[in-house]
Amino acid sequence: MAGYRDKYFENNKSNHGWYTCVRCGKKLRKSDVDIDHIIPQNWGGKHNLNNLQCMCKHCNRSKQDNVDFNIVKDYSRNVVKNTKKNIKKNVKNSIKNLFK
Ligand SMILES: [Zn+2]
C-alpha cells in the first residue's frame, strides 16, 4: 500500500518541502499529504502517476468515492503534466546524445 505514495513523491518534487492540495490550494507538509486516486481504486483506478494526486485530508475525505466531472479535469491535468515531463526528459537525453 505504501508503494504508490513513494512513487508519487519520487516523481513530484516538493516546493521547498511544501505540497499543494489540488482542490483547495492549501499548502501541506509531506506528512499531511493524502495521495488521492483520481479514479477510485474500487472503480478500477490504478497506482500509476496519471491517477495519483496530492490532496489535503479534508478534501480527500469529502471527495470519498464520488465520481464527477472533477475526475476528468484532474486526470487530464496529470496526463498533460506527466507527458510534458517525459518530453522534456527525452529532449534532454537526445541533446546529450548529440554531444557524446
Ligand atoms: Zn484541500
Image (tube, rainbow, N blue to C red):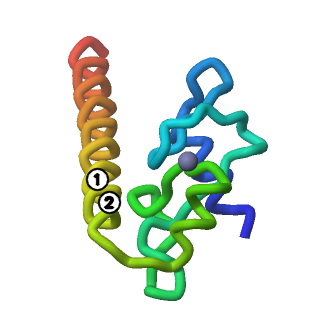
| Residue 27 screen position, x and y as percent | 60, 32
**Disc ID at residue 75:** 2
Q: Nearer the viewer, residue 67 or 3?
A: 67
Identify the image quadrant of residue 90: top left
Circles 1 and 2, Cβ within 8 Å, touching? The answer is: yes
Residue extending farthest top: 99
Identify the image quadrant of residue 95: top left
Q: Amino acid at mark 1?
A: Val
- Per the image, label 1 sits on a secondary structure element best described as helix
Q: Nearer the viewer, residue 70 or 8?
A: 70
Q: Amino acid at mark 2?
A: Tyr
Taking the spot 26% from the left edge, 12% from the top edge, the residue there is: 99
| Residue 4 screen position, x and y as percent | 62, 61
Residue 24 appears left or right of 75: right
Q: Nearer the viewer, residue 79 or 72?
A: 72
| Residue 96 screen position, x and y as percent | 30, 18
Taking the spot 42% from the left edge, 73% from the top edge, the residue there is: 39
Q: Local crowd at mark 2 within 10 Å, few (<14), some, or many (≥20)?
A: some
Taking the spot 43% from the left edge, 63% from the top edge, the residue there is: 51
Marks 1/2: CA–CA distance: 6 Å
Residue 39 higher or lower than 15, as above or below = below
In the picture of the structure, the residue carrying the numbered disc 1 is 79
User: Where's the N terminus, which quadrant?
Assistant: bottom right
